[in-house]
């Protein structure tokens, strides 16, 4: 244990070491996971509220470690961001998701929009647009079937961000703002960002049926989005009541456990097959 003259430093030292070593374990683990194919992508349906039809899916990353079991993205994505490993991991997810979507189309399933999460570090990467373009070329997926989910944190570098978003939009890709309303940012970016969709964060959706304030916020977000010609998707929909509320407010799309948890490609195919039948 280090001695630096401050008693309490010595006291906290072990837990600091524990945190650092857990991080290092996860970092090394992620490097290995990329090489040894331990990552998987699961898919969560996005449903058109008016028709109840599945019109898209969100790709969500899962890590199946041989000893540690399934590790939640909430645990490893922040460390992947810190270490830069999010760049190769994010590229892998994008490729996997685009390829899967193309495969579904080739196998005759209804055309779906594939939503992929892009972290702010990934978005800031200078070759992001080329990387996305290459991935679409390699997988053969038409850009109109890809949506990138961005968070409000990319606003920090606003001019750069708008330019990149415009390049992606020019290719025909859809853009959405994830976790809308949780980023502590001003709303003025809604005037300049060339986005298609706002995703209402699940912290607002959760209590729309029980808390009049959340109900009012969600109602307001939907109206504002529609006035700006944006679509709205509510995430974290778990109950019939929440869905009914969203329907009366003309929310465009919904996603959440009420419809389905994130599931494997094979399990999703079963649902898609039933929808057609
Ligand atoms: P997110 O993008 O906001 O994804 C939504 C999260 O809510 C997912 O958690 C999903 O499983 C969960 N969820 C969906 N429906 C419901 C519901 O009805 N109720 C509740 N309580 N939760 C629901 P997950 O898969 O654990 O992912 C957590 C976060 O990790 C994601 O939040 C996203 O920020 C990040 N993430 C996941 N995959 C990727 C990825 O491929 N790339 C990047 N950059 N981030 C990812
Ligand atoms: Ca998301
Ligand atoms: Ca979200
Ligand atoms: Ca979130």
Image (cartoon, rainbow, N blue to C red):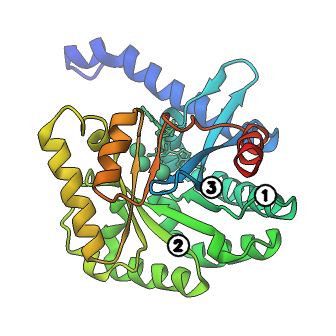
Task: State the image coordinates of residue 123 (x, y, percent, origin top left).
Answer: 49, 67
Q: Position of residue 143 (x, y in %)?
A: 66, 76
First in sequence: mark 2 or mark 1?
Answer: 1
Q: Is residue 234 above or below residue 152?
A: above
Image-based side of 80 in relation to 177, left or right: right
Q: Is residue 35 left or right of residue 255?
A: right
Numbered disc 3: secondary structure: helix
- Horizontal and vertical percent position of residue 161: 40, 77
Say which quarter of the image contains residue 104.
bottom right
| Residue located farthest toward the left when viewing the structure as drawn | 213
- The N terminus is located in which quarter? top left
Q: Nearer the viewer, residue 260 or 157?
A: 260
Of circles 3 and 2, the one toward us is 2
The image shows a total of numbered marks equal to 3
Q: Residue at x 57, y 34 (%)?
A: 261
Instruction: Identify the residue under disc 3.
Output: 90
Residue at position x 53%, y 51% in the image:
52
Q: Earlier in the sequence, mark 3 or mark 2?
A: 3
Question: Which numbered dot is residue 109?
Answer: 1
Residue hosting label 2: 174
Q: Nearer the viewer, residue 133 or 159?
A: 133
Residue 182 drawn above or below residue 19: below
């Amino acid at each position: 244990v280090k001695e630096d003259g401050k008693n309490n430093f010595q006291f906290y030292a072990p837990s600091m070491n524990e945190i650092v070593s857990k991080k290092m374990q996860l970092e090394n683990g992620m490097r290995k996971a990329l090489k040894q194919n331990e990552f998987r992508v699961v898919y969560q349906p996005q449903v058109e509220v008016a028709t109840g039809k599945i019109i898209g899916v969100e790709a969500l990353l899962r890590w199946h470690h041989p000893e540690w079991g399934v590790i939640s993205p909430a645990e490893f994505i922040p460390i992947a961001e810190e270490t830069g490993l999010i760049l190769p991991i994010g590229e892998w997810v994008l490729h996997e998701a685009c390829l899967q979507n193309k495969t579904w189309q080739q196998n005759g399933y209804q055309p779906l929009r594939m939503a992929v999460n892009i972290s702010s570090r990934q978005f800031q990467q200078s070759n992001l647009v080329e990387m996305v373009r290459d991935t679409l070329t390699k997988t053969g997926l038409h850009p109109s079937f890809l949506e990138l989910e961005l968070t409000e944190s990319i606003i920090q570098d606003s001019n750069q961000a708008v330019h990149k978003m415009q390049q992606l939009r020019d290719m025909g890709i859809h853009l959405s703002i994830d976790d809308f309303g949780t980023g502590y940012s001003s709303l003025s970016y809604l005037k300049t960002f060339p986005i298609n969709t706002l995703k209402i964060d699940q912290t607002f959706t959760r209590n729309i049926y029980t808390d009049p304030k959340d109900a009012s916020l969600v109602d307001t977000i939907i109206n504002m989005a529609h006035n700006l010609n944006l679509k709205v998707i509510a995430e974290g929909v778990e109950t019939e009541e929440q869905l009914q509320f969203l329907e009366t407010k003309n929310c465009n799309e919904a996603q959440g456990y009420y419809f389905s948890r994130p599931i494997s490609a094979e399990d999703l195919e079963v649902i898609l097959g039933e929808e057609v039948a």
